[in-house]
Image (spheres, grey):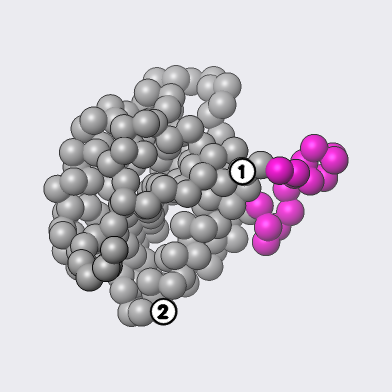
Amino acid sequence: QKADKDKGLLLVITGNGKGKSSSGFGMVARALGHDMKVGIVQFIKGAFSTGEEAFFRRFPEEVAYHVMGDGFTWDTQNLEQDIASAKAGWTICQKLLQDPKINVVLLDELNIVLKMGYLDTDAVLADIAQRPSMQHVIITGRGAPDTVIDAADTVSRIEDVKHAFRAGIQAQKGIEL
């Protein structure tokens, strides 16, 4: 089959392995190399600064960077706050998804927010579908809902084969954060 069409892609990077966010941020770096404008919204993460945040904030003219999480919420202590943070984050996403000057939007850890039911998946997908025709959207996070996978143009599932954490090694700067 001949690939001769242009369109903004919806990419989903999911699975239990390490590297979902890293892949998304790699595409952000690639886009910047092509003089593209980028919007980033990080859900869930937020209790501490990451290397990618420190790096991409160096480019304020090219990158709109937003950290909306209150930290990891596998066992939430405040469900109402987590939902409010997710909704506030989505309000920012909607603005990025409506901006024709933004070429790539990275929605980091959005899959977790959707899986936990903090946002309505159908409403999120409707907003994404209404974006500018050549805007690319990257969604990362474990547990991508089937409807998100179905809507995507490209889906990668990162498999967990072996992880240093299980050998008692803590998260390392430059690798996990």
Q: Nearer the viewer, residue 163 or 156?
A: 156
Q: Quadrant of the N terminus?
A: bottom left
Q: Nearer the viewer, residue 166 or 170?
A: 166
The residue carrying pointer 1 sits among few (fewer than 14), some (14 to 19) or many (20 or more) residues within 10 Å by Cα, namely few
Q: Which residue is mark 1?
A: 159
Q: Secondary structure at mark 1?
A: loop
Q: Main secondary structure of the magenta part?
A: loop
Q: Secondary structure at mark 2?
A: helix
Residue 33's disc is 2
Question: In screen coordinates, is 145 left or right of 176?
Answer: left
Q: Position of residue 172 (x, y in %)?
A: 74, 54
Q: Nearer the viewer, residue 46 or 136?
A: 136
Residue 4's disc is none
Q: Amino acid at mark 1?
A: Glu
* Magenta span contains residue 167: yes
Q: Position of residue 63 (x, y in %)?
A: 36, 66
Tag in front: 2 or 1 = 1
Q: Residue at x 66, y 42 (%)?
A: 160
Query: From which residue to which does the magenta span run?
Result: 161-176
Q: CA distance from mark 2 to mark 1?
A: 28 Å
Task: Say which quarter of the image contains residue 7.
Answer: bottom left
